[in-house]
Image (cartoon, grey):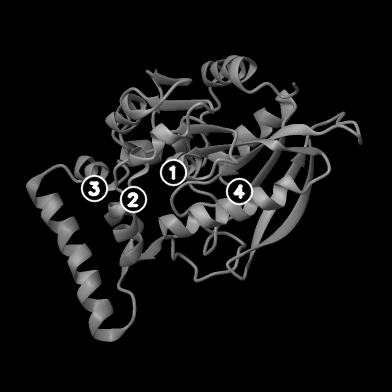
Amino acid sequence: MKEQIVVFQSAGLRLHGVLGLPEGLPPSQRRAAFLVLHGFGSNSEGNNVLQPARVLSEFGYVTLRFDMRGCGKSEGEFGRVICLEQVEDLGNALDFLAGHPGVDPDRIGVIGSSFGGAVAVYAGGTNRRIAAVISNGGWGHGERKFRGQHPSPDAWAKFTAMLEAGRVHRARTGKSLMVPRYDIVPIPSHVRENLERQKVGMLAPNSVEMFPAETAQSMFDFRAEEVVGKIAPRPLLLIHAANDSVTPTEQSIEMFKRAGQPAELHLFSGLDHFLFAENSTRVWHLLRNWLDTYFAVTK
C-alpha cells in the first residue's frame, strides 16, 4: 500500500488524514474506497484503524483513515469529541475522498469501530452518498449503552451525577468540566492488560485521556439505531464480540433488528471489543466474503 499524508477542511478546521492506495492501481481506474474511522478518543494511528486499512488495501480498496476534530493531529479543541460533529467530519472526508482520481465517487463505504461504528451507522442512515456501512462493536442507543457500561445502581448514580455536574459547571462558569475517559467508558483491567501483553495496542499514541462532560452528554443523546433502517437498500455489516466487555453486544443486535435488507450481523466468540486490533483471520475471512457479495472492489 502506498500512503500519503493529506489535509482537508471540516467546519473551518484542518483535519489530518492518511490516504492509502493499493498496489497496482492503474492510473485510469477508479476503485471502490473506504473511510476508516477511529474509536472513542483515539485517532488514525490506532490498531483498530491500521489493521482494517491494511486489509482493505490488500483487498484492492482505496482507504482514507483520518483524525476527527480534536483528536490526533487534527485541529479543534483537543478532547472535545461530539457525536454529530464527527458525523459532519465524516461527510467532509467523504467529499474529499470522492474527488480523488483513483476513487469511484459513487462507491465509497465507511468502516468504524466502537464510537466510530456508531458514527458510521448514523452517517449511513442520514447521508445517501455513503455506499456501504461496516460497524465493529458499535452502538445505537447512547443511554442504554451507558446503562450497560455502568450496570450497578451506584455506578449509574455516579455516572448520571457526572452528567449533571457537567451541565451545572458549564452554566456557572462557561467552561467545560473535564472528566477521565474511563469514567465515561469503563474498560475492564483484564482487557487492557491482555492487549498490552499481546502488544496489540488498545490506544493510539496521543489518545485523549480527559474529555469535557459535553462529550459524555453527546454520546448519551446519540441514537444511531433510529436511522439504521434508512441505510437499506445499501449493504450493512454489523460485527460484534459475542461477549463484549466494553460495549454491550445487544447494541448491535438491536440495530440489526431495526435494519433493512441487505444487512448481516456476525457475533464472534473468543474475541473481545478490540477485535480488529487482534488481527483475527476469522474476521478478515468474513469481511472478504461479505465484500465480495455486497460491495466488490470493482464492478
What kind of element bears circle 1? Answer: helix
Nearer to the camera, 126 or 237? 126
Mark 3 in CB contact with mark 4 (< 8 angstroms): no
Q: Nearer the viewer, mark 3 or mark 4?
A: 3
Q: Nearer the viewer, mark 2 or mark 4?
A: 2
Residue 205 visible somewhere in the drawing: no
Expressed as whole percent of the image width and height from the top left, the position of residue 155 reads 14, 50
Which of marks 4 and 3 precedes in the sequence? 4
Tag 1: amino acid: Tyr
Label 2, on which residue? 222
Q: Nearer the viewer, mark 3 or mark 1?
A: 1
Q: CA distance from mark 4 to mark 1?
A: 23 Å
Q: CA distance from mark 3 to mark 1?
A: 16 Å
Q: Nearer the viewer, mark 4 or mark 1?
A: 1
Residue 122, label in figure:
1
Which of marks 4 and 2 precedes in the sequence? 4
Expressed as whole percent of the image width and height from the top left, the position of residue 131 reads 60, 34
Which of marks 3 and 2 precedes in the sequence? 3
Nearer to the camera, 239 or 268? 239
What kind of element bears circle 3? Answer: helix
Label 3, on which residue? 143
Tag 2: amino acid: Phe
Residue 106 visible somewhere in the drawing: yes
What kind of element bears circle 2? Answer: loop
Q: Residues within 10 Å of mark 4 (few under 14, many from 20)?
A: many
Which of marks 1 and 3 precedes in the sequence? 1
Mark 1 in CB contact with mark 2 (< 8 angstroms): yes
Q: CA distance from mark 2 to mark 3?
A: 8 Å
